[in-house]
Image: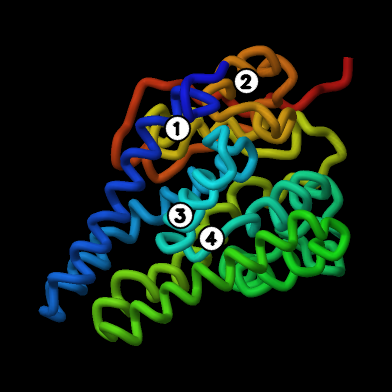
Amino acid sequence: MEHGLFRHRQDRVPVGVFLAISLGDLAVYFYVDGVWVLLAYSLAMALPKGIASAWNHHHQHVPTFRRVWLNRLLELAYGLQTGMPTNLWRLHHVLGHHVNYLDQRKDESRWQRSDGTQMGELEYTVHTALSAYPRALSLGRRYPQVLRPFLIFGILTWGVAIALTVARPLPGLLVFLLPMVTCPIFTAWVTYDHHAGLPTSSHFEGSYNIMNPWFNRLTGNLGYHTAHHYRQGAHWSQLPELHALIAPRIPAHCYTRSFFDALLPTAQPVPAPEEPSTPG
């Protein structure tokens, strides 16, 4: 349902939060010179900017605004926070990973080595982070209409960050460039637990799900990961309802816990593992 400038009214709050982060970045960049304050700010914003990657991801699946120029402005803000500019997610993730995630020979976020063995967490993180831009460019040859904005606004986003750093080196480095380099690494790391160790041809058995409500509030229901892959065009606000519809088809081993369960425990149940079948 359309609501003014937004395609979905649920996007108003997250957009407000991440635009406020952008304003905070600019304020610190222009008015703070102390190295310790800049370091403290950079560390404090590491997790919020990591979370911004999840919302940037949602935006690349379902554009936030009805007008293209507003989406491009939002993508510039997300790009300066996360290092992932316009259409990087769309090429690598939407047109790549979502199409190929059940085939580890093709998956852009593959967790298997070429010999079929499972990568470790560190290996996957490094491999996925370093290959994101090259794989997006490779996919872009098949989708030139998506590649063109990626190239234009990718160059613009990194150009702005570099120009800000040249003008004010220490604030530019700690407020913009450092997060833009580290955030894709963090994002690759947290995505390891989305699919690793689930070799299958079934959408209902190919993703891990996290039911912790705090995790899902902060990430826009990314814990409903089977539902997200089952219908990737669904808006993030629709994922809990979609998950409820398909939950009977999701096996218990496709549920897992996150570090939020240790920090913010809840009574939210996680299905027990299936009992091994015995001969009748």
Q: Position of residue 80 (x, y in %)?
A: 43, 63
Where is mark 2, residue-wise? 243
Q: Are marks 2 and 3 in contact (CB under 8 Å)?
A: no
- Rendered image: mark on residue 189: 4
Amino acid type at image mark 1: Asn
Is disc 4 in contact with disc 2, using a CB cutoff of under 8 Å?
Answer: no
**Disc nearer the start of the sequence (1/3):** 3
Q: CA distance from mark 1 to mark 2?
A: 13 Å
Q: Mark on residue 78?
A: 3
- Amino acid at pointer 3: Tyr
State how far apart marks 4 and 2 are (Cα): 24 Å
Which label's residue is closer to the chain start, 4 or 3? Answer: 3
- Element on which disc 3 rests: helix
Tell me the element at label 2.
helix
Looking at the picture, tell me which residue is in the foreground, 12 or 250.
12
Asked if residue 181 is positioned above or below residue 217 in the image, the reply reads below
Judge whether 171 appears above or below 140 on screen.
below
User: Mark 1 packing: few (<14 Cα in 10 Å), some, or many (20+)?
Assistant: some
The x and y percentages for residue 149 are 67, 59
Quadrant position of the N terminus in the picture:
top right
Q: Which mark sits nearer the N-terminus, 1 or 2?
A: 1
Q: CA distance from mark 2 to mark 3?
A: 27 Å
Residue at which label 1 appears: 216
